[in-house]
Image (spheres, rainbow, N blue to C red):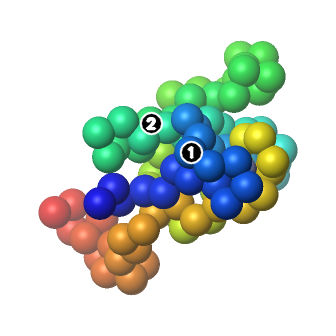
Amino acid sequence: MSKYNMTCDNCGKVEHVLIDGYCFDDRLLEDVEFEVRVVNDKVKVVVEESAKPYFETLNEKLWLKRAKEFAEETDIVECPYCHNQMLFATELKPRSIRKIVKTLKI
Ligand SMILES: [Zn+2]
């Protein structure tokens, strides 16, 4: 079974889902959407087409990294078609454990 859910209750299987930059940066990226795809059970994130000009003045690489980290851990994403919330990560580990692992760089 995949680690991530890509099926919307309303629309069925979707090719990508959306996350809002607000989720991992409260001001700078508010209303900036990122497209999240899952390829071979790995999360891939790109800047949504309409948000591209916004990134000309920002460190796109850094924010894509942040977005990817967030997407890998989030259980709620948005359907790109009906904009309903969808469940995403299906095997969530407790956040505290993940933090320790990150700190130790295991
Ligand atoms: Zn939908």
Q: Residue at the spot x=35%, y=77% of the render? A: 93
Q: Give the residue at x 77% y 26%.
A: 51
- The residue drawn where x is 64% and y is 54% is 8
The amino acid on which the numbered mark 2 sits, given as a three-letter code, is Lys
Q: Determine whether the residue tagged by mark 1 lies in a helix, strand or loop.
A: strand
Does residue 30 appear left or right of residue 42 in this picture?
Answer: right
| Label 1 C-beta lies within 8 Å of the nearest ligand 1 atom | no
N-terminal of the two: label 1 or label 2?
A: 1
For mark 2, give the secondary structure. strand
Q: Name which quarter of the figure residue 48 lies in.
A: top right
Figure quadrant of the C terminus: bottom left
The circle on residue 67 is none
Query: Can you name the residue that lies furthest to the left here?
Result: 106
Alpha-carbon span between mark 1 and mark 2: 17 Å
**92 w.r.t. 56: above or below:** below
Q: Residues within 10 Å of mark 2 (few under 14, many from 20)?
A: some
Mark 2 lies on residue = 44
Quadrant of image for the N terminus: bottom left
The answer to whether marks 1 and 2 mark residues whose Cβ atoms lie closer than 8 Å is: no
Give the x, y percent position of residue 58.
Answer: 68, 27
Could you say where residue 69 lies in the image, as x and y percent from the top left? 45, 52
Which amino acid lies under the numbered mark 1 shown in the image of this protein? Lys
Residue 63 visible in the shown view: no
Ligand 1 closer than 8 Å to label 2 CB = no
In the image shown, does 43 or 82 lie closer to the viewer? 82
Give the answer, above or below, for where 96 lies relative to 48.
below
Q: Which residue is more in the foreground, 88 or 105?
A: 88
Closest to the camera, between mark 1 and mark 2, is 1
Q: Position of residue 20 (x, y in %)?
A: 72, 49
Q: Position of residue 6 (x, y in %)?
A: 52, 50
